[in-house]
Image: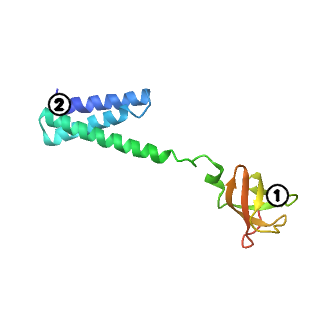
Amino acid sequence: MDPWLIWVLVGLLLVGAEMVLPGAFLLWIGMAAVGTGLIVTALAPSFPMAVVVFVLLLAAGVVTGLLNRRAATRADLNTPEAGLVGRAGVVLTAEGPGLRVRVGDGDWAAEGETPGIAPGAPVTVTGVTGTTLRVRANPSMSPQG
């Protein structure tokens, strides 16, 4: 059996094993092995040189995986700020110390950054504190219901 074919088959087995046992570890080893197999096909290096190529491809894959994982775990990924800031809404009530605002299909407690916001006034969400929206009057927008 040709050396390149062994590299590719082992790589494909490892990628398949990653699908059965997910964890993003076997994926990089398998992809490095497939890449090594393709390079061995094209350049026909000696076995020690093929191992060096494998280690370099594996290191590049692990670094890429770590950088992607770090970018995907942002702290604000599943917070109210992620989808509410910048959205338009309408004031439902302006009683007591705070406001009640409808944004999309949800009603939220809010505090106005602009004094004297009346019911029915269009607003824009500028921030979130806990579960209370910070809103500012936006007369250029049409009221939503």
Q: Within the image, what quadrant is residue 21 found in?
A: top left
Q: Within the image, what quadrant is residue 110 found in?
A: bottom right
* Tag 1–tag 2 contact (CB < 8 Å): no
Residue at point 65%, 61% (across, down) = 86
Vertical comparison of 80 with 8: above or below:
below
Disc 1 packing (10 Å; few <14; some 14–19; many ≥20): few
Kindly tell me whether residue 104 is visible in this rendering: no
Kindly tell me whether residue 93 is visible in this rendering: yes
Furthest toward the right, the residue is 95
| Relative image position of residue 102 (x, y in whole percent) | 77, 56
**Could you tell whether 31 is left or right of 38 in the image?**
right
Residue at point 24%, 41% (across, down) = 56
> How far is mark 1 from mark 2, CA to CA?
72 Å
Please name the residue that numbered disc 1 is placed on: 98
Report the quarter where the N terminus lies: top left
Q: How is the image coloured?
A: rainbow
Viewer-proximal residue among 106 and 75: 75
Vertical comparison of 45 with 90: above or below:
above
Mark earlier in primary sequence (1, 2): 2
| Relative image position of residue 144 (x, y in whole percent) | 76, 62
Furthest toward the bottom, the residue is 140
Q: Amino acid at mark 1?
A: Gly
Badge number at residue 3: 2
Badge number at residue 118: none
Disc 2 packing (10 Å; few <14; some 14–19; many ≥20): some
Q: Within the image, what quadrant is residue 46 found in?
A: top left
Number of labels in the image equals 2
Q: Amino acid at mark 2?
A: Pro
What is the secondary structure assignment of the residue under circle 2? helix
Vertical comparison of 11 with 72: above or below:
above
**Could you tell whether 103 is left or right of 96 in the image?**
left
